[in-house]
Image (tube, grey):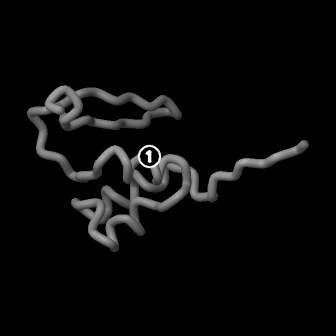
Amino acid sequence: MSWNNHIWTLSVKDGVVNIEKSDSEIPEVIVDIQTLTKAMFGYQSLTDSFKVGNVLGNTDEIETLDKLFVHEKAQLKDFF
């Protein structure tokens, strides 16, 4: 879907995250939404996804982005 296919710039300054559409930029990291979601929730790191070919780009930028995410496996706990 064309409305869901864009280049985004993510920046973090003083703990504030900013995301802007920047289709005119050349991407430094290429990742689909499924792989990005896995990384954000700690299921699979971007670095590991890069190793299997699911993330493309500059390894330094991939590692920098990866450091922003949780690196613990998600848990669903049942206390009943």
Furthest toward the left, the residue is 24
Reply above or below: 44 against 35: below
Reply above or below: 7 against 43: above
Furthest toward the right, the residue is 80
Which residue is under mark 1?
Answer: 37
Three-letter code for the amino acid on which mark 1 is drawn: Thr
Q: Position of residue 34 (x, y in %)?
A: 37, 48
**Quadrant assignment for the N terminus:** top left
Residue at the spot 18% in from the left edge and 31% down from the top edge: 22
Task: Describe residue 78's horizontal placement relative to residue 24 as left or right.
Answer: right
Reply above or below: 56 against 3: below
**Quadrant assignment for the C terminus:** top right
Tell me the quarter of the picture where residue 17 sits. Answer: top left
Q: Position of residue 36 (x, y in %)?
A: 39, 48
Reply above or below: 43 against 23: below
Crowd class of label 1 (few under 14; some 14 to 19; many from 20; radius 10 Å): some
Furthest toward the front, the residue is 80
